[in-house]
Image: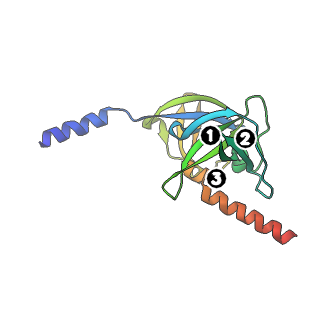
Amino acid sequence: MQQEQIKSAQAVNLVPSIKQYLTFNTGGECYALGILLVKEIIEFGGITKIPLMPTFVRGVINLRGAVVPVIDLSARLYGKCVDEGKRTCIVIVEIPDNADGLTELGVVVDGVNEVLELNNADLTAPPQFGSKIRTDFIEAMARLPNRLLMILAPEKVLSVEEMASLVAVTELELVKEH
């Protein structure tokens, strides 16, 4: 019995842990998100603006009858909206929420690139400093032949709770101004 457990454990270690990531550009940098979060990629447009929202909340779209909030990732990371171009698109993602469900979000990016398969051995811990974005937004770094790729931590960068609190702060500031 014990030998069977050892063989089973050895077999598990022989199978490489490969995950797929969607790579995309935003804010002049290349990033990646786990492909399992990505529901679809749609053409940029059809966004209905919502008044009194922070810069990173572009508005909402109607996606087959569902109202989906749209976040500008460049504005979220750098405070500057995506410069819309031919490759600009919306990546529809499903993010786990605190209610044990999934929240659908649209994420505006400059353009998508490719899907990469990465082994755990290709990944390294994120830097503790020196990044252009908040370090807690980075889940890992991937060592590619000619560069490093930042893999985003979706539960941080696309945190519905954090973004909602930022919206509340923006609303309070606007009320104080008037």
Tell me residue 170's x, y (percent): 76, 63
Q: How is the image coloured?
A: rainbow
Q: Residue at x 83, y 71 (%)?
A: 176
Q: Within 10 angstroms of label 3, few (less than 14), some, or many (20 or more) residues? A: some
The front one of 144 and 58 is: 58
Kind of residue at disc 1? Ile
Cα distance in 3D space between marks 3 and 2: 14 Å
N-term-proximal mark, 3 vs 1: 1
Kind of residue at disc 3? Arg
Q: Within 10 angstroms of label 1, few (less than 14), some, or many (20 or more) residues? A: many
Disc marking residue 134: 3
Q: Is residue 136 above or below residue 143?
A: below
Tell me residue 81's x, y (percent): 77, 45
Disc marking residue 27: 2
Cα distance in 3D space between marks 1 and 2: 19 Å
Cα distance in 3D space between marks 3 and 1: 23 Å
User: Mark 2 falls on what kind of element?
Assistant: loop
Q: Residue at x 66, y 49 (%)?
A: 133
Tell me residue 127's x, y (percent): 56, 48
> Quick check: marks 3 and 2 in contact, CB under 8 Å?
no
In-image side of 16 versus 133 (left or right): left
For label 1, the residue is: 92
> Quick check: marks 3 and 1 in contact, CB under 8 Å?
no
User: Mark 1 falls on what kind of element?
Assistant: strand
N-term-proximal mark, 3 vs 2: 2
Please identify, in this view, whether the residue under mark 3 or under mark 1 is nearer the observer.
1
Q: Residue at x 54, y 31 (%)?
A: 144
Q: From this viewpoint, which residue is outermost toward the front?
A: 65
Is residue 134 something that shows in the picture?
yes
N-term-proximal mark, 1 vs 2: 2
